[in-house]
Image (spheres, rainbow, N blue to C red):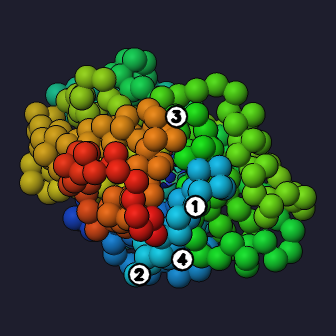
């Protein structure tokens, strides 16, 4: 056992933890980040990175970008289909082992110390510090910043196991027959018949597809839904190789509790993915930005409530609107598809949501305003 001191200890080196480490090191703080896994490590994720996430990072992804996404295929069971071309790159795809490794290396280049294969076990707070017991000894820091994902051990241990609600999602990595990726092009596909009260996605990577299903209402038999969804697409048949992996997406923080004394929750650990698409990377990065801003303003004090205040002001209203959008869109998916998705004005807004050109509150407001018009079939679907 050893005692190891730093200004802040970050648990979890996913996007939230690695980006926060980078931002805090830039402020001149001594930062240690621990992760229970060796890096690079695999992470279950579609790897869809929205334009707003890229803008937030603010640097070119280079080879880490697998495909730029400049169009969305919106469909219902591969029968009715709208192709929404987007004027500029609205999103891109990445593979999480590479993307997360890149963010971590960027933090390390700023002087962040990284301890791999070091799992959080417990923490106790004193007047001026927090002592963290890990699988590799004891760390002491002024703040403990938990970015340890949907099943956060820090959250479960220090905030209770019931704080966050989550739903399952399942994906298949499909290495298709030659030519299928080229034919699919630089598009992302969203199928509103892919999963009951949810959707199915197909995201192209450099050498494979990521194909998955998700519903904000939860659900069972995801493998059956995924197989039924994939069966509708010729390009996914006769794959050279296929693997399946599933995990959970945390959609809400029941008590809206994000910090207790010297311990703060970020990203999935805080329950802050969005409900409409299940997007979590942007929101994980955004929590890092807000936590770094709160620390810049208040310092490393135990009585600072700046982080929660920023979350309530800048993030939670958007996430609440996303939840309402999800209820609206997936409650009656067939109706939604014919009256919302085929409506050119509204599907334009959906595309704007992915790129970040418009926010969820704005989209919800415009959708609600247009309500009587949805009942009329759209004359110009595309
Ligand atoms: C099937 C699926 C598809 C998805 N697709 C997308 C998508 O296309 N686009 C998108 O934006 N979002 C997607 N998401 C959501 C996205 O993956 C998450 O929201 C995002 O990874 C959250 O980042 P994070 O940094 O908070 O946590 P994570 O990325 O989960 O990182 C947490 C880190 O903490 C570490 N850790 C865990 N426990 C401990 C411990 N006890 N001690 C030390 N370290 C620990 C883990 O090893 C991990 O490295 C998807 C999720 C799922 C399940």
Q: How crowded is mark 4: few (under 14 residues within 10 Å), some or many (20 or more)?
A: many
Q: What element carries label 1?
A: strand
Q: Mark 3 vs mark 1: which is more N-terminal? A: 1
Q: What element carries label 2?
A: loop
Residue 75, position in %: x, y?
A: 57, 56
- What residue did someone put label 1 on? 81
- What residue did someone put label 4 on? 68
- What residue did someone put label 3 on? 197
Is the residue under label 2 in contact with that under label 4 (CB below 8 Å)?
no
Q: Is mark 3 on a helix, strand or loop?
A: loop
- What residue did someone put label 2 on? 88
* Along the line of sight, the residue nearer the viewer: 159 or 210: 210
From where the camera sits, is residue 277 visible?
no
Q: How crowded is mark 1: few (under 14 residues within 10 Å), some or many (20 or more)?
A: some
105 sits left or right of 275 in the view: right
Which of label 4 and label 2 is nearer to you? 2
Q: Distance between the residues labelled 4 and 2?
A: 10 Å
From where the camera sits, is residue 49 visible?
yes
Q: Distance between the residues labelled 1 and 4?
A: 21 Å
């Amino acid at each position: 056992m050893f005692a190891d001191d730093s200004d802040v200890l970050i648990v979890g080196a996913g996007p939230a933890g690695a980006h926060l480490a980078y931002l805090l090191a830039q402020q001149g703080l001594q930062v240690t980040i621990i992760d229970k896994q060796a890096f690079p490590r695999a992470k279950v994720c579609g790897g869809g990175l929205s334009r707003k996430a890229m803008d937030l990072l603010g640097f070119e992804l280079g080879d880490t970008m697998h495909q730029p996404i400049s169009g969305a295929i919106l469909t219902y069971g591969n029968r009715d289909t709208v192709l929404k071309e987007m004027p500029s790159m609205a999103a891109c795809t990445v593979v999480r082992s590479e993307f997360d490794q890149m963010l971590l290396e960027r933090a390390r280049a700023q002087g962040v110390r990284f301890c791999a294969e070091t799992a959080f076990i417990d923490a106790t707070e004193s007047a001026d510090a927090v002592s963290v017991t890990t699988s590799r000894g004891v760390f002491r820091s002024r703040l403990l910043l938990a970015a340890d994902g949907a099943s956060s051990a820090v959250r479960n241990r220090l905030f209770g196991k019931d704080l966050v609600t989550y739903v399952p999602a399942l994906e298949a990595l499909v290495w298709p027959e030659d030519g299928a990726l080229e034919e699919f092009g630089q598009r992302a596909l969203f199928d509103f018949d892919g999963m009951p009260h949810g959707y199915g996605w197909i995201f192209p990577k450099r050498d494979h597809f990521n194909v998955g299903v998700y519903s904000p209402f939860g659900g069972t038999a995801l493998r059956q839904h995924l197989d039924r969804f994939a069966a509708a697409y010729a390009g996914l048949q006769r794959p050279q190789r296929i693997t399946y992996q599933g995990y959970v997406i945390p959609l809400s923080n029941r008590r809206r509790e994000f910090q207790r004394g010297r311990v703060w929750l970020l990203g999935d650990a805080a329950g802050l993915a969005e409900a409409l698409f299940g997007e979590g990377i942007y929101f994980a990065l955004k929590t890092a930005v807000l936590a770094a801003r709160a620390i810049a303003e208040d310092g490393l004090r135990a009585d600072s409530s700046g982080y929660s205040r920023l979350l309530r002001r800048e993030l939670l209203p958007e996430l609440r609107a996303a939840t309402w959008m999800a209820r609206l869109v997936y409650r009656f998916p067939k109706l939604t598809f014919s009256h919302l998705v085929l409506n050119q004005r509204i599907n334009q807004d959906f595309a704007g949501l992915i790129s970040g050109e418009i926010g969820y509150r704005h989209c919800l407001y415009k959708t609600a305003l247009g309500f009587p018009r949805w009942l009329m079939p759209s004359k110009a679907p595309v």
